[in-house]
Amino acid sequence: MPAGEYDLVIRGAHVADAGGAGDGDLAIRDGRVAAVGRGLGPGREEIDARGKLVLPGGVDTHCHIEQLSGAGVMNADTFETATRSALYGGTTTTVSFAAQHPGMRIADVVADYAELARRGAMCDHAFHMIVADTSGDNLDDVARLIEEGHRSIKVFTTYDKVRLDDAAILQVLRVARAHGALVCFHAENDAIIRDATARLLAEGRTAPRDHAASHPRMAEIEALERICRFAEYTGQPVMLFHVSTREGVEIVRAARARGAPVWAETCTHYLFQTVDTLDRPDGAAFMCSPPQREAADVEALWHALDQRDLQLVTSDHAPYRMDESGKFLHGRDAPFNKIANGMPGLELRLPVLFDAMVSRGRLGLAAFVELTSAAPARLFGLTGKGALRPGMDADVVLWDPEREVTYAADDLHDNVGYNPFAGHTVKGWPETVLLRGRVAVDGGTLHVEPGQGRRVPMEKSPAMAAEKP
């Protein structure tokens, strides 16, 4: 064999992706997987991975990065800090939001976010276009941006500054259908939330624990059902974000059984936290929308993942510091409806899920890779990501399946300042992370610089194929 047949060979690992697993070597050339098998030829560099698992890098398709929220609060994370945190957690591709607000031109918004990512991102990335204003030339911009590889659109059915009414939602669905995109929804009924919030405030119920009651499960139920019907009516595929309730799972399952073009996800925190989390003294740290639910909902979500009624688990990384720049922008005694919603999750998603799914055997290794890497890459047309077949990007994570780590209060690599899983012990740890064949993190040390991440254009995936209306 010639010396240095490959750039890098990872030797003696258990190599696995959603398609299968086996013991052997993985070879990398020119940033891509070149071969997988036993007894591969030499590499210019080699890694002894005996006792390790070699898995595809994580793909997190629901992250808020360097974004002004619908409530007017800026995220704590820049592209540099968020993608640094992602890499430490084994995630090599993020899909965050180019967030339009009313009065903004969507083409300018996408260009601005792309420039921020170009300068700061350490891992590969793509964007969802948040469409909050369909006036003027915006829908023409959306059509053009889809053709340029921005094939995902985010729509809100609630929040004053970003929500669309039903007529505008149908317009967006029609444009996506004509050009080939997936339309993602934050689906909660705005009127129900307004009504519940007004009643709670009138009763003097203003604490973080009261946030859950301000987003009752019926708000999710009504909006999910409505969006599923819109998908059926138009034939346009939709992705339902952050399903949190047992009833939501049932709506998705029934819609898919009818043949509706519906996909859906849940998030890490809905699988491990319940509404009781908000009753802690630091409950504001855990506020998110939809809120955490009951133990029975947690079990329903796990079952739905097992049955693939839900296809993804994402972080919904929405970072706000526990100070006046973030959660307490309106003061530390602010009522729940004035406290920023969201928590960090990019770095936590994979280790917490690995512990539950692989170490504790909840769904298994193949399901772990499918739900956190393969399926998000496949559904969103992120070609080259989510698998370890020859020709794929060499986004590779070496996991130590025996290493145990207990999270501390502030040990993440983002800019948020707290860890919502503090005290939680995980077994299984992403020790070495490669991005396109280059070591990005190894032994707790970062080896990449801001701007080394690349934008991944979305190709039209089978999930984006419109059905007959």
Image: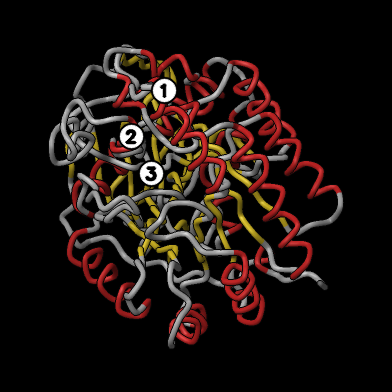
Q: Which mark is in front, 3 or 2? A: 2
Q: Residue at x 68, y 25 (%)?
A: 300
Q: CA distance from mark 1 to mark 3?
A: 44 Å
Q: Where, by quadrant of the figure, is residue 320 drawn?
A: top left
Would you name the residue on which mark 2 appears?
343
Q: Position of residue 41 (x, y in %)?
A: 44, 51
Side of 410 where 223 appears, left or right: right
Q: Residue at x 61, y 40 (%)?
A: 220
Amino acid bearing label 2: Met
Would you name the residue on which mark 3 appears?
91
Is 29 in front, or is 201? Answer: 201
Q: Which mark is in front, 1 or 3? A: 1
Q: Where, by quadrant of the figure, is residue 250 drawn?
A: top right
Is 441 in front, or is 334? Answer: 334
Q: Where, by quadrant of the figure, is residue 125 drawn?
A: bottom left
Q: Which mark is in front, 2 or 1? A: 1
**In the image as oriented, which residue stretches furthest toward the right?**
258
Residue 385 drawn above or below residue 20: below
**Mark 1 or mark 3, earlier in chain:** 3
**Label 1: few (<14), some or many (≥20) within 10 Å?**
few
Q: Residue at x 42, y 42 (%)?
A: 316
**Label 2: few (<14), some or many (≥20) within 10 Å?**
many
Q: Residue at x 59, y 71 (%)?
A: 181
Which labelled disc corresponds to residue 203?
Answer: 1
Side of 263 where 44 appears, left or right: left
Amino acid bearing label 3: Thr
